[in-house]
Structures are given as C-alpha cells and as structure tokens.
Amino acid sequence: MNPRTPILMMVAMALAACGGAGAPESPSGALLQDDFSSSSCVFGSLQAGTTQGYECTDGEFRAWIDNDQASYDFVTAPTSEAYGDVRIEVDARIVSAVPYGGAVVVCRGSQAAGDFYAFTLSSDGSVDISDYLDGEEQIAHFDTLPEGTVKSDWNHLRVDCVGNHLAFYVNGVLGIERDISEFARGEVGLGAGGASEGMTEVRFDNLMVSAP
C-alpha cells in the first residue's frame, strides 16, 4: 500500500458544546462534547471545491474527500485546544469508501504541522494506528477486527491516548493497541479518507472527549 499523506486544514472554531437532545450525558471528566445539532458546531466547516471538506449538517458531522484526486490522502478537522491524556468516543458511519478508506480519529500533536497519531476504521473492517511527522506517514500498525464487529450503519469508536499507550476500540472490541514515545499533547480531530481511489465520505455523531 502506498503511504498516505494527510491534507490538513485549519479553521477558526467555537468550542462551546451544542448539547442537543440525544447527546450522551457528560461524565465528570468531560473536556469536550458535541452532538453536531448546530451548524456552528465545534469543528465549523470548510470546503475546497468538490474535492474535500467538512461541515455540520443534518445533526451530524460530515467529512469527505475525493481519493481519485488525492490518492491515499485524508482530510481532518481539528479542535483549537490541545489535550494530553484523553479518551475520544464518537459514533461513525462510513457512507462511501473502498478498502483502506474510512473514518479517521486524530489525537495529539499538531495537525497544522502534520505531527500526530491517526486511528482509522476502514470500510473492509481493518483498523490501524499511524504516526505522522511533517505530514508524512512514518509507521502504520494494522489489524483486522473479528467478523461481525463492524456494523453496516453506525459504529461506536473509542480512542484512548493515555501516557505512552494508544488503543482503538470499535463497538467495545479492542481492535489494535501500541506504545509510543513521541507526542504527549495535541489536538483532537475527526475526518475521512485513506483510500486509493473513489469518494470517501463519513458521518460522525455524539462526540465525547474525556479525561481517562
């Protein structure tokens, strides 16, 4: 597989949680929450023609990228706050993607600088955790979820970035974990992409970032 290079876009964003009906209750350690019920949600919006972008629409956060135009790239929307140890939980629905393309969750580092960790649930049921430095993928660890873990509609993703340990869960099942020694703090982000071709589109809902 060819290395993936993220397309990183920074926008000014409000950090107030929307807090609409249907959002999960905030735990005592909640750092950030959004159910995307408002168009002025935590990630705001950005569109680069018809090639890539993100927005809050229909009570969900939508991210998309045309991987025919940008093979193996992905687009992510970051928070403007930096966090240390976090647990990120979000519901994700892959609308369209070919293998290796899918839902992306980011923690730590700087997405503007291209230094961060990316967790990807692909349309074929594989998961990976990748290190990015200066916008280039350095190391990628892959695994495949047990048959029946991934649902055809919404899947609950949980990413733990705690100390030097990273872990990625899908619908309560641990998909992949690994230890790291690089970034200790940074942004949280959501996005879509990673495929070799075709349009990759993902919808997200009920984001919760909490202290573990």
Image (cartoon, grey):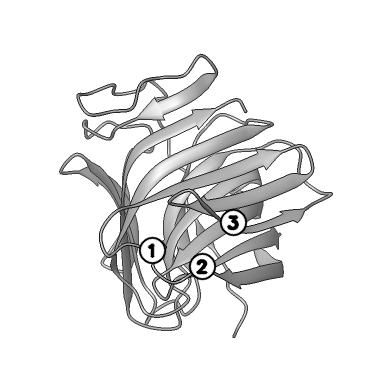
- The quadrant of the rendering that contains the C terminus is top right
Q: Few, some or many C-alpha atoms within 10 Å of disc 1 (few <14, some 14-19, many ≥20)? A: many
The circle on residue 150 is 1
Q: Is residue 47 visible?
A: no
The circle on residue 118 is 3
Give the vertical position of 16 relative to 80 (above or below). Answer: above
Residue under the image location 56 percent in, 45 percent down: 159
> On the rendered structure, is 173 left or right of 176?
left
Give the vertical position of 158 relative to 8 (above or below). Answer: above
- The quadrant of the rendering that contains the N terminus is bottom right
Marks 1 and 3: CB-CB under 8 Å?
no
Disc 2 to disc 3, how far (Cα)?
Answer: 17 Å
Residue under the image location 28 percent in, 64 percent down: 49
Tell me where residue 95 sits by quadrant: bottom left
Marks 2 and 3: CB-CB under 8 Å?
no
Residue closest to the far right:
181
Kind of residue at disc 1? Val
The circle on residue 81 is none
Residue 43 lies, in percent from the top left, at: 38, 38
Kind of residue at disc 3? Ala
Marks 1 and 2: CB-CB under 8 Å?
yes
Residue under the image location 59 percent in, 65 percent down: 128
Q: Few, some or many C-alpha atoms within 10 Å of disc 3 (few <14, some 14-19, many ≥20)? A: many
Q: Is mark 3 on a helix, strand or loop?
A: strand
Kind of residue at disc 2? Leu
Residue 21 lies, in percent from the top left, at: 19, 24
Q: According to the image, label 2 marks what residue? A: 145
Which of these two is toward me, 52 or 168?
A: 168
- Mark toward the start of the polypeptide (1 vs 3): 3
